[in-house]
């Protein structure tokens, strides 16, 4: 496991993620968070499950506080994906017209 400050993590996040190693992030010499590569075979299934439970619980709490239903989230995500595909397709079409 690697140990870094919040500033180091922000500056080197991509590099740290590519290394595929767990990273403990510190703020003012105290643990602030942990990055665990999802595909890391050294991370127990229990740790992954605990992380997912924590994340989904926090998302559900925030969603409920804002009065947003799960269906609304799924609809927004579907619209986002459709718009993203449209933007990608438009970008490819523009590149073809410009001879790129």
Image: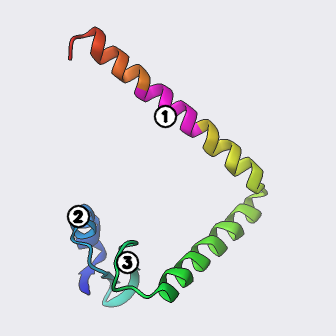
Q: Which residue is mark 1?
A: 84
User: In the structure shown, which secondary structural element does the residue marked by tag 3 occupy?
Assistant: loop
- Reply above or below: 85 against 58: above
Q: Which residues are magenta?
A: 80-88
Q: Are marks 1 and 3 in contact (CB under 8 Å)?
A: no
| Rendered image quadrant of residue 8 | bottom left
Residue in front for this viewpoint, 23 or 45: 45
Indicate the position of residue 46 as horizontal and vertical percent values.
52, 88
Q: Is residue 81 left or right of residue 38?
A: right
Spatial CA span between label 3 and label 2? 17 Å
Q: Which mark is residue 11?
A: 2
Indicate the position of residue 32 as horizontal and vertical percent values.
40, 82
Indicate whether residue 15 is drawn in magenta. Answer: no
Residue at 30 percent of width and 90 percent of height:
29
Mark yes or no: residue 68 visible.
Answer: no
- Reply above or below: 21 against 60: below
The mark that comes first in sequence, 1 or 2, is 2
Residue found at the far top of this picture: 97
Q: Are marks 1 and 2 in contact (CB under 8 Å)?
A: no
The mark that comes first in sequence, 1 or 3, is 3
User: In the structure shown, which secondary structural element does the residue marked by tag 1 occupy?
Assistant: helix
Judged by its main secondary structure, the magenta piece is: helix
Q: Are marks 3 and 2 in contact (CB under 8 Å)?
A: no
Q: Which residue is mark 3?
A: 36
Crowd rating for badge 3 (residues with CA inside 10 Å; few <14, some 14–19, many 20+): some
């Amino acid at each position: 496991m690697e140990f870094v400050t919040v500033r180091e993590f922000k500056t080197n996040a991509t590099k740290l993620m590519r290394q595929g190693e767990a990273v403990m992030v510190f703020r003012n010499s105290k643990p602030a968070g942990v990055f665990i590569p999802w595909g890391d075979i050294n991370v127990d299934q229990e740790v992954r499950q605990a992380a997912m439970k924590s994340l989904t619980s926090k998302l559900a709490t925030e969603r409920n506080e804002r009065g947003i239903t799960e269906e609304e989230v799924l609809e927004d995500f579907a619209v986002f994906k459709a718009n993203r595909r449209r933007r990608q397709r438009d970008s490819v079409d523009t590149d073809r017209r410009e001879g790129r």
